[in-house]
Image (spheres, rainbow, N blue to C red):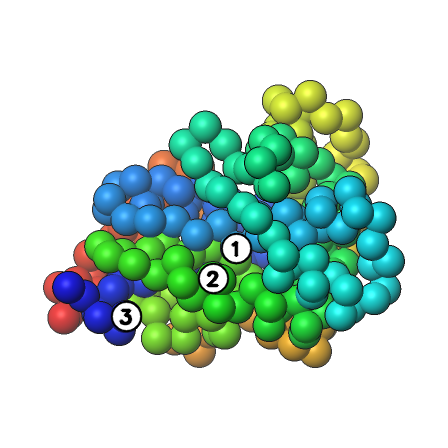
Amino acid sequence: MNSFSDVPVITIDGPSASGKGTVATLLAQELGWYVLDSGALYRLTALDCMKRKVDLEDQELVAEVANALSVKFLPEGIFLHGEDVTDSIESEQVGAIASKIAVYPELRAALLQSQRNCRRAPGLVADGRDMGTMVFPDADLKIYLVADVRKRAERRYKQLMKKGFSVKINGLIADLEARDQRDLNRSHAPLKPADDAIVVDSSDLDIEETLAVVLEHWQDKCNQA
């Protein structure tokens, strides 16, 4: 049986809409590993706070909501307290609240262990903003995925329109820029590449090409072991 430290981890960090979630999912499928979408935990907390009409300025209360989350990640969807919220957590309103509360140290501490508990054999691909710097600092491979803000907005636009959300591209650009500033400048676990991360710019790459680049870096790591 593998020990905790024997379970390999690949982290994929980066700003909103850089494609890290899709790449992480495809990479996990390719390797036959588990996948952790850390952003979903913050969105689930945001959604539950909305449903419970929690004061979003009360950091301790927001952390309590996170500690009480009953979540199931199933093939058919994401369930919060027994309710399918797969589409609900993708709304821009939920995303905006998640970005706002994600700067709270109490909330990040509340979710830290639940994220680390996702590490199990045969391996884990974890995507987020502080996976390589805070959650899995001993990860075997750390990728920092970036892309031009307009390209990111265009990707997010297509995703939201496909799901039936009404959005405008200029509004998405402004929202992404605001989120970037919050993530980059927060006092606890700011968005930044780990010292040993490999930066991959996906601005001019499609998902398959980005996945191929990450797989190549992983193969290089394996060959060096």
166 or 215, nearer to the observer: 166
In this image, 212 relative to 224: left or right?
right
Q: Which residue in the structure is indicated by mark 3? A: 4
Q: Residue at x 50, y 32 (%)?
A: 77
Amino acid on which disc 3 is placed? Phe
Q: Secondary structure at mark 1?
A: helix
On the image, the x and y values in percent for residue 55 come to: 86, 58
On the image, the x and y values in percent for residue 43 come to: 65, 48
> Can residue 215 be seen at all in this image of the molecule?
yes
In this image, 7 relative to 37: left or right?
left
49 or 166, nearer to the observer: 49
Q: Nearer the viewer, mark 1 or mark 3?
A: 3
Q: Residue at x 49, y 62 (%)?
A: 114
In this image, 160 relative to 196: left or right?
right
Asked if labels 1 and 2 touch by Cβ distance under 8 angstroms, the answer is yes
133 or 33, nearer to the observer: 33
On the image, the x and y values in percent for residue 203 come to: 52, 46
Dot 3 or dot 2: first in sequence order is: 3
Is residue 203 positioned above or below 75 on the image?
below
Quadrant including the N terminus: bottom left
Q: Which residue in the structure is indicated by mark 2? A: 115
Amino acid on which disc 2 is placed? Gln
On the image, the x and y values in percent for residue 171 come to: 80, 40
Mark 2 to mark 1 CA distance (whole Å): 7 Å
Circle 3 crowding by C-alpha within 10 Å: few under 14, some 14–19, many from 20:
few
Amino acid on which disc 1 is placed? Ser
Q: Which residue in the structure is indicated by mark 1? A: 38
In this image, 168 relative to 106: left or right?
right
Q: Residue at x 25, y 64 (%)?
A: 7
Quadrant including the C terminus: bottom left
Mark 1 to mark 3 CA distance (whole Å): 19 Å
